[in-house]
Image (spheres, helix red, strand yellow):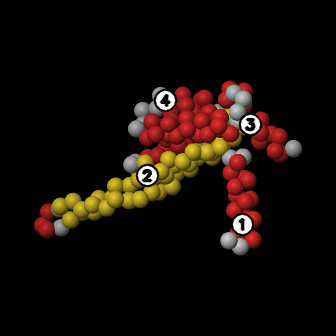
Amino acid sequence: MGARKKEFANRLKEERKNKYFAVLRKCPSSPRKMRYVVDMIRGVEVNRALDILKYSNKEAAGGIEKLLLSAIANWQAKNDGTRVEDSNLFVKEVFVDGGTMVKRMKTAPQGRAYRIRKRSNHVTVILDSANSSATQTK
């Protein structure tokens, strides 16, 4: 590995130490449906976001709720000794990317076939603390 590549890799590694995130891959739901649920929690405080997801009647909300709990656990692993309630955690970024698409054929009249696309998606949740973002800007 060259020197420039190694420096870049080390810089990315250092930046990741200060990021608290979780990723859900290959979720068997269409990205369009998932984005609807994700838009409800973007920028919201973590406990409020969990309540929103818990009482949402969308099927995709269950997967996002587990993902958010995983991101909180990742935050706790990097911040020993601090409580979630005292840190003012909020959902900084959350985005949905299209995943793999399984393509199937469905029989149609007169010897034709219709294409069925079973979509999946990848969801990423990034948390931030209101306390840490205020100290970083100063």
* Label 1–label 3 contact, CB within 8 A: no
On residue 54, the disc is 4
**Residue named by callout 1:** 6
For label 4, count other residues whose C-alpha is less than 10 Å away and answer few (under 14), some (14-19) or many (20+): some
Coordinates of residue 39 in the picture (x, y in percent): 55, 43
On residue 26, the disc is 2
Is residue 43 in view? Answer: no
Q: Residue at x 53, y 43 (%)?
A: 38
Q: Quadrant of the N terminus?
A: bottom right
Is residue 111 in view? Answer: yes
For label 3, count other residues whose C-alpha is less than 10 Å away and answer few (under 14), some (14-19) or many (20+): some
**Residue named by callout 3:** 130
* Label 3–label 4 contact, CB within 8 A: no
- Whether residue 69 sits left or right of residue 100 in the image: it is right
Q: Quadrant of the C terminus?
A: top right
- Closest to the observer, 110 or 102: 102
**Alpha carbon distance from label 3 to label 4:** 23 Å
For residue 21, what is the image quadrant? top right
Give the mark nearest the N terminus, 3 or 4: 4
Given this view, does label 2 or label 4 mark the residue nearer the observer?
A: 2
Q: Residue at x 74, y 59 (%)?
A: 11
